[in-house]
Image (tube, rainbow, N blue to C red):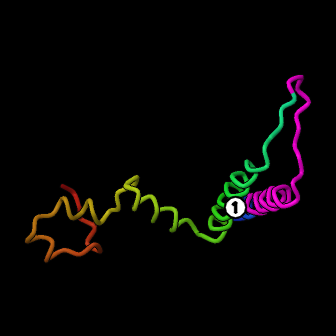
Amino acid sequence: MMNPQRYALIVAIVFAAIAVLQLARTALGWPIAGTMPWGLMIPVWLSWIACAAAVLLAWFGYAASRSDGAQETHWQERAGLVEPDIRLAELCLSRQDRMAKTPADEDWSC
């Protein structure tokens, strides 16, 4: 059965292989030419950019395969996409109530 961690690891391996091929193309100067009538040639320097993008995607896939989902929530909180419950709780409570209540109370209705 395919779970998200295994899928992310497979994606990381695929992108790592793409990065290695792009690096080999850059180091060995392999040309890529299209069969269009106007003779499309892809410059070698473009492989540096493709290699960097593939390495970045491979790293993201590897990091996703090693996480349990908590890391995803962490970066979403840092980006401001998800507001953690404790921030919402602090907005609802007055200064005096903050000293008396803890997050374990879970009575955060405003």
Q: What residue is drawn where x is 83% and y is 32%?
A: 40
Location of residue 48 in the rendering, given as x and y in whole percent from the top left corner: 72, 55
Q: What residue is drawn where x is 73% and y is 48%?
A: 46
Say if 49 sits above or below 17 in the image: above
Location of residue 81 in the rendering, given as x and y in whole percent from the top left corner: 40, 52
**Amino acid carrying mark 1 in the image:** Val
Say if 48 sits above or below 86 in the image: above
Residue 14 among those drawn in magenta:
yes
Would residue 92 be found to the left or right of residue 25 on screen? left
Would residue 26 be found to the left or right of residue 99 on screen? right
Instruction: Give the magenta-colored segment's residue range.
Output: 11-38
Location of residue 30 in the rendering, given as x and y in whole percent from the top left corner: 89, 51
In the image, 84 versus 63, the foreground residue is 63
Work out which residue is located at the far left of the displayed protein and give it: 96
* Res. 105 image quadrant: bottom left
Residue 9 among those drawn in magenta:
no
In the image, 27 versus 87, the foreground residue is 27
Q: What residue is drawn where x is 26% and y is 59%?
A: 88
Quadrant including the C terminus = bottom left
How many neighbours does mark 1 have within 10 angstroms: few (below 14), some (14-19), or many (20 or more)?
some
**What secondary structure predominates along the stretch shown in magenta?**
helix
Q: What residue is drawn where x is 87% and y is 54%?
A: 29
Q: Which residue is mark 1?
A: 55
In the image, 36 versus 10, the foreground residue is 36
Would residue 12 be found to the left or right of residue 94 on screen? right
Work out which residue is located at the far top of the displayed protein and give it: 37
Would residue 66 be found to the left or right of residue 74 on screen? right
Q: Secondary structure at mark 1?
A: helix
* Res. 80 image quadrant: bottom left
Location of residue 8 in the rendering, given as x and y in whole percent from the top left corner: 70, 60
Quadrant including the N terminus = bottom right
